[in-house]
């Protein structure tokens, strides 16, 4: 076979597909059965959990893919897909179900690209953020003209439009001084968000905080990819979470026979985006005794938005190829600055080891918004994974 341009290699790896995707619209019970079936077919690389209930009592299920499901591995980034924020915008929901089936089947078929994807990242898939709205939209069918039917949740709230304007605080802090990440919620918004997200027991204010670790797993440096329309400003400023939102298809509720074409048109983009979570730099922030530093701030000169290290001392910073000046700092420690070049392929490992300052000696503070009771754990810089010899978990 003649040499192929590198741009064609990902397509080649996905060209011989045998994954039996299910091209149909999934009502809630069918969605749940599909997620459980995928989990049962790939139990060693998946975990099915929920983040609460909708207003009407439907569980919001998340399917996780990882070679160690349920565990954050230091230096392994996490990414999540969220679909169906607006209940009547259903294509993202169906694409994420297709993606779940695809990842499981291709892992079982030993597709090297999918093996590497699941070994090197932790993927969380929430097909439907608004199952109540979906059921309303689905009940009218794709042939009716109720353009907004099912858009809102059962409380009548547009889940994409009811967020505090943290940009105002960001611009004020930029001019007068103040944090550029983990911006606190205004007091008058806390009860309002509780109403909007009551179906998820605090979808925003109790979990799913990309700047913190929490029992269900999303962690510092994770990237949002919401197949819906726009929470990115709020997530970026309040939870330190990178997010990109898309609206797919001019038809909010495409006919079932159109789903195979939509899947083939979006499959490669879904895979490539998951791979992009590795772009930029990552590393560990430790003290002089090699204990991890939680909540250390990593700044990039020229970019007015910082990230913080997680509970294990690891951090992740998405960056385009180029040369950057990067600084790590933590209260009570002398900052450390390095110059690093980011390439087009794979992350650049940049570790920091901070010495305790002689001028101010006090413990490291938690990052803003972090819950109580999280004690830093001792951690040493992990060795890079040897993906060529790593034992695969799951069916052969």
Image: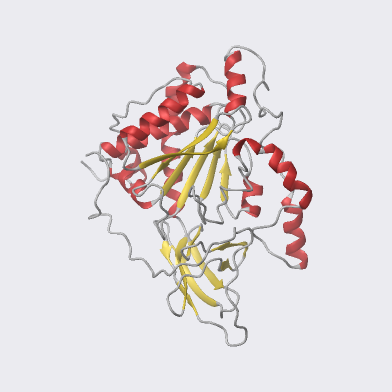
Q: Nearer the viewer, residue 55 or 239?
A: 55
Q: As displayed, is residue 250 above or below residue 312? A: above
**In which quadrant of the rendered view does residue 98 lie?**
top left
Q: Is residue 156 left or right of residue 273?
A: right
Q: As displayed, is residue 392 above or below residue 35? A: below
Where's residue 57, x and y in %?
Answer: 58, 29
Viewer can see residue 121: yes
Residue at image point 35% right, 49% down: 68
Q: Is residue 303 left or right of residue 185?
A: left
Outermost residue, bottom side: 358
Residue at image point 36% right, 66% down: 382
Where's residue 385, x and y in %?
Answer: 31, 59
Query: On the rendered image, what quadrant is the N terminus found in?
Result: top left
Q: Nearer the viewer, residue 324 or 129?
A: 129
Q: Is residue 259 left or right of residue 102?
A: right
Numbered label tally: 0
Q: As displayed, is residue 295 above or below residue 100? A: below
Viewer can see residue 88: no
Residue at image point 62% right, 35% down: 199
Residue at image point 43% right, 45% down: 123
Where's residue 88, x and y in %?
Answer: 61, 24
Q: Nearer the viewer, residue 242 or 157?
A: 157
Outermost residue, front side: 373
Q: As displayed, is residue 364 above or below residue 109? A: below
């Amino acid at each position: 076979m003649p040499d192929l341009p590198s741009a064609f290699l990902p397509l080649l790896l996905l060209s011989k597909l045998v994954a039996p995707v299910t091209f149909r619209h999934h009502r809630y019970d069918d969605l749940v059965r599909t997620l459980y079936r995928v989990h049962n077919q790939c139990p060693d690389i998946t975990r099915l959990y929920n983040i609460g209930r909708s207003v009407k009592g439907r569980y919001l299920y998340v399917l996780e893919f990882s070679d160690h499901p349920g565990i954050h591995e230091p230096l392994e980034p996490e990414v999540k897909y969220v679909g169906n924020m607006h209940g009547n915008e259903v294509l993202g929901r169906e694409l994420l179900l297709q993606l779940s089936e695809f990842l499981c089947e291709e892992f079982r078929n030993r597709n090297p690209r999918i093996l590497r994807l699941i070994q090197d990242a932790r993927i969380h898939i929430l097909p439907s953020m608004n199952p109540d709205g979906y059921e309303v939209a689905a009940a009218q069918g794709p042939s009716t003209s109720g353009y907004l039917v099912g858009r809102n949740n059962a409380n009548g709230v547009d889940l994409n439009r009811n967020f505090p304007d943290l940009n105002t605080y960001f611009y004020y802090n930029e001019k007068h001084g103040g944090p550029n990440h983990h911006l606190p919620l205004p007091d008058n918004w806390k009860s309002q968000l509780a109403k909007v997200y009551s179906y998820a027991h605090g979808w925003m204010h109790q979990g799913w905080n990309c700047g913190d670790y929490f029992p269900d797993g999303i962690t510092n440096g994770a990237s949002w990819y919401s197949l819906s329309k726009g929470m990115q400003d709020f997530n970026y400023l309040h939870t330190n979470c990178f997010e990109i939102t898309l609206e797919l298809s001019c038809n909010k509720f495409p006919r079932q026979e159109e789903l195979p074409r939509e899947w083939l048109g979006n499959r490669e983009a879904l895979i490539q985006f998951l791979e992009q979570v590795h772009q930029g730099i990552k590393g560990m922030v430790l003290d002089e005794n090699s204990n991890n530093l939680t909540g250390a701030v990593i700044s990039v000169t020229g970019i007015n938005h910082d990230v913080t290290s997680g509970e294990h001392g690891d951090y992740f910073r998405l960056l385009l190829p180029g040369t950057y000046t990067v600084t790590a700092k933590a209260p009570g420690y002398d900052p450390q600055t390095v110059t690093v070049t980011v390439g087009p392929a794979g992350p650049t490992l940049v570790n920091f080891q901070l010495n305790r300052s002689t001028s101010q000696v006090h413990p490291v503070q938690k990052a803003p918004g972090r819950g109580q009771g999280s004690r830093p754990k001792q951690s040493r810089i992990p060795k890079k994974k040897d993906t060529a010899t790593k034992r695969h978990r799951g069916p052969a």
